[in-house]
Amino acid sequence: MSDGKGRPLDFARGRRFGSPMLSVILADSVPAAQPFVLIFSYEGSLPRAPLDYITADGILLRDESRWYPAVDLAGFAVNDFKISIPSGWHAVASGQWNGSALSQTDTTTVVGWKTRQAVSSRSIVAGPGTVWPCSNPIVATSGSGPIVDLQRCESPSHQHYSDRLQIRAADAIHAFGKILGEFPQDRLTIVEGFPGVQGATGYSAPGFLVVSRDVMRYADEADYAPEFLPHELAHQWFPLEVVLERQEDGWLAESLAEYLSWRYLREKDPEAARRMVMSAMRDALEPDPPRPLAMGLRLFALEPWSVTHATLYQRGMMVFRTLETVIDRERVDRTLAEYFKRYHGRSASVADFQKICEEIAGRSLGWFFDYFLNGTRIPEIEIRQVPSGAPGIVAGEIVVKDMMPEATLRVEMRIRTAKGVVEHSVATHGEVTSFSVNVPGPAIGIELDPDLRILRWTEAVRRHRPQMALLRQALDLEEESKFARALEHCRQALALDPDDVALNQQRIRFTAARLEYRQGAFAGAAREFRAAHDGHSIDPVDTNFYRAWCRVYLARDAKRLGNIDAARAEASAGLALLAAALDARVDWGGSRSGEISAREALLELSK
Ligand SMILES: [Zn+2]
């Protein structure tokens, strides 16, 4: 190895295993402030990683893929890439594309991407595709802020998708810009990737977002994964611009993106925001035992996706909401803006975030971070009414169990009286806090924390956990063809929640109906399919999914009875349901067809 003048060079690798550190020992010392160029050539094969892909239909190389040998997400640097790709492909990286190929042959195109400022990532995505600028491509992130150029890169084999995704992206960027500070990049390219993946999957890098095909396909369906796009766009701020100091700080990446997504939906689609919270409150506490949020991104490697999602996404988001009840929403916003301002372009930790939070709140919040991030306990909050002795006053106590004595939460309550609803809130201190509220008439009922702002045990969770355990057992028994016992488990699960507080009835009934059908108990199955069809789940896509499959089975049953017209009627009613629900492919077992979508089954039955 030698330098440009033929003098010997040496280098030393970092001593820590996997360290990206490389020290170059120059033959001569270089005078201070004199620039010099080092060129590294390297080759090798890339290790397999769960999100990266290298296929004939596209390539995603994240930082973790190690295509660029130094993996240091806190190493902000200016990128200047020349990427050779097969002709007909497009490649996207952070920064600016010069708009045309640098060079082109019959088989190869070379494109260049350069960032204006230092960025945290060296990720590259490529695939067959065309770039579509948004017909309404520019958006100011704030009154005087920069213009964001929005474009989309999609596979030419599909129909041209609508601009809806870019328009929604522009809106979310604008909304986040107002809370957090300006969008850190000047371009956002949404790239179709993850070939063959079903459902909404995404990967965010500075200035670009790779999404699965379904995200583009169902961009016009407002009910399809509404939290997905704002979540991914929030990543442009956190953790791409304020990177995580350690994996354990993952609450400031996934949980924060989920919280910001909820904040966005709260303004734009309050129903979707409400559903997001309902699901989170129910599902976040399903993992048993609960894992500490301080495991952060390590959850991805150590736990199944369902546990990681319930913990880092749903429970983590609820912890941000709970923080709103401790320091109020306006102070959470100020904390986020200050956190971004202070740490953008470098790394930060939960401790740094806590410090800003405490500065803004003007008090110590050690108990909050200790309890909700390091710990796994969940508070139990109850309301006890006590006789007030006066007709116009409701009196009672709020009891917070399994919480630290220094904790204080603002608990909202909704008091229904014969003469209207009274909203009230109480800041708790210690285990028992008394309150009294003036009311216009006798109280009929008091609802505690009606908007589910505080992470706590709820009746829905208490019913949900054993229900899901029974449902899992039922599906295992079905695998072993023990249908009668599986059905018995479904019946027990239904009996746990007769008034459907946990909103699991539709999926359990559907499973019960399927089991009856597989046993040949067709009349009972048909009754159960009708009941499942008329029920609903939290997510409207799930509701439509079960309805579509109920229609499939009801049509099959009608056909079995020789009632072709009824079968066709069921099928065409089914085909009118949400496209995203109709296209999801499943294998319910017991058929030779393997994975099939409700649409395919219904089209067959409508003939
Ligand atoms: Zn994310």
Image: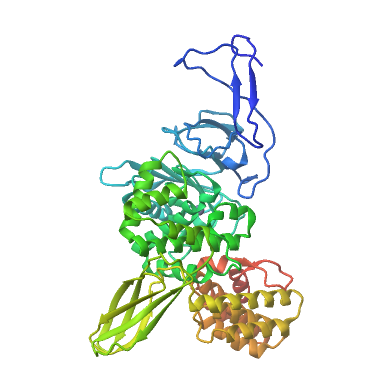
**How is the rendered protein coloured?**
rainbow
In the image: residue 101, left or right of residue 468: left
Residue 605, percent from left and from top? 62, 76
Total numbered badges shown on the rendered structure: 0
- Front-lying residue, 143 or 496: 496
Q: List x then y, in percent, for residue 274.
A: 41, 69
Which quarter of the figure is the C terminus placed in? bottom right
Q: Position of residue 281 (x, y in %)?
A: 48, 70
Camera-side residue of 169 and 548:
169
Coordinates of residue 28 in the picture (x, y in percent): 57, 11
- Image height check: is 509 above or below 237? below
User: Can residue 137 be spotted in the picture?
Assistant: no
In which image quadrant can residue 438 be found? bottom left
Residue visible at 46% across and 37% down? 119
| Relative height, residue 53 to residue 112 (above, below) | below
Q: Is 357 on the left or on the right of 128, as rendered?
A: left
Vertical side of 491 occupied by 355: above or below: above
Q: Is residue 97 left or right of residue 524?
A: left
Residue 169 seen in this snapshot: yes
- Residue beneath the point at 41% across and 71% down: 452
Tell me: residue 139, above or below residue 429: above
Tell me the quarter of the image containing the N terminus: top right
